[in-house]
Amino acid sequence: MKFIEKYRDRESVQRCAAAIRATTTKDWKIMEVCGGQTNAIVRFGLDTLLPPGITLIHGPGCPVCVTPLELLDKAIAIAARPEVIFCSFGDMLRVPGSDGDLFGVKAKGGDVRMVYSPLDALKIAQDNPTKEVVFFAVGFETTAPGNALAISLAQKRNMKNFSVLVSHVLVPPAMEAILSGETNQVQAFLAAGHVCSVMGYHQYLPLTQRYKTPIVVTGFEPLDILQGILLCVRQLEAGKAEVENQYIRVVTEPGNKAAQELLKEVFQIASQKWRGIGSIAHSGFALRQAYADFDALNRFDLDISTVEESDICISGLVLQGERKPGDCPEFAKACGPDSPLGATMVSEEGACSAYYRYRRHSMERGE
Amino acid sequence: MCLAIPGRIIEIAAAQDDDSLLDCTGKVEFGGIIKEVSLALVPAAKVGDYVLIHAGVAINTVDEKEATETIDYIRQIEAMADTPDDRSDNDDNSAS
């Protein structure tokens, strides 16, 4: 878009960082919820522009990271079946299950295809009527409407060879789980802008009131993130706890009603397991009964035994903002993007992976 | 994963099917690249509008006026000139 350079403009970024420094008189801990924001913060070094009192805590907002291990194992088992074409977003393909990943299935001859859109998977199903086409429907509220659209179109077109393996996670319940934790350190949130673009931000009002925590809906460019931090700091310094919207160019309070109606039609809210964290009530989408025929778990008979996660890995604590990647003794040693021990190293948007890519060498130098 | 990119609608396909918005597609331009996307979730969008595309689906419209206002807001911040704590030693880390 034509505005992108302006949101990365050095002078504006410096000016906004200076405003944050001028506003900050106390120490504050702010969590950015979304992995895309974490990636931008580490990539552009935005945290290094902040005064020492402001600590950014990296949140759990990477759906690739938090997809449960047992579901990955099921995906891998389904993908290995000879009658299946398994379609997935690219970033799920190298996430390790208990024994290997989806790329490994492809290497052994499985028909695993990287798709850009759930609608591409639908097209593959139409073009391959003798195959079972399974789409790995992973993501937050940003991704869920497109997946709901594909499922709804499959039903409308009476497609019998298309199904989905669903692992949808919802952001507000995860934020509440963090805020209600006994060891919570988060004093303000940058909420995930694209999630709010779909869902609006009215659901955050009770959270700000109940936990006295400012929540600022924030975008993904450097200037967006710094402005989101500035708005958080202003509230914190003034003792306020309100919902504010930094990302006004794509987020409105009610969100996208058409998308929300489709979500409600196809999915119901259910408990969801988050890799590295555990089960959180009402934090996921499951297919409604009317769409149960499209549930890949009903279509294939799977016998899976899942091994336990590494007990060295601290990704659960990193996901909840209680530890930083560098606190882990195995960071960039036994654990790296090619051989991840846990959730936060498996995807580019995981905090450990972002630190590995952009901070590893400076961390080794002790900076 | 929640990466979404704004693009401008340059064409909306005529409905092939009378009963449903779900099939609505169109062509969207992203800085010279043109892609066909679903417009099912932005029923009010018109040719020329900016939409936010995620995984082949327009998930919302983008307000061009609001996009400029955010930038104007930053321009209005005058704190920098008055701030002694203008740490130029961070310049090297500001962007990549």
Image: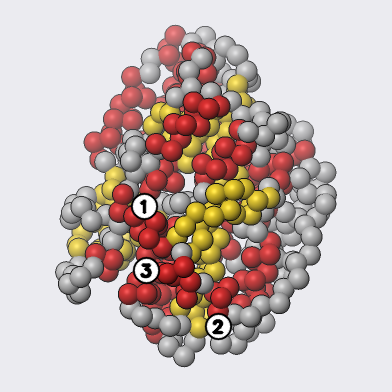
Provide the residue designation for mark 2.
Answer: A84
Q: Residue A334, can we see it?
A: yes
The chain identifier of the residue carrying mark 1 reads A
Instruction: Provide residue A194's location: percent of width, then percent of height.
Output: 42, 46
Instruction: Provide residue A362's location: percent of width, then percent of height.
Output: 71, 37
Instruction: Provide residue A102's location: percent of width, then percent of height.
Output: 63, 71
Q: Secondary structure at mark 2?
A: strand
Residue drawn at x 76%, y 71% is A305
- Closer to us: A114 or A121: A121
Residue drawn at x 33%, y 78% is A157
Q: Residues within 10 Å of mark 3 (few under 14, many from 20)?
A: some
The chain identifier of the residue carrying mark 3 reads A
Q: Residues within 10 Å of mark 1 (few under 14, many from 20)?
A: some
| Position of the C terminus of chain A by quadrant | top right
Provide the residue designation for mark 3.
Answer: A152
Tags 2 and 3 both on a single chain: yes
Say whether disc 2 or disc 3 marks the residue closer to the N-terminus.
2
- Closer to us: A50 or A256: A256
Q: Amino acid at mark 3?
A: Ser
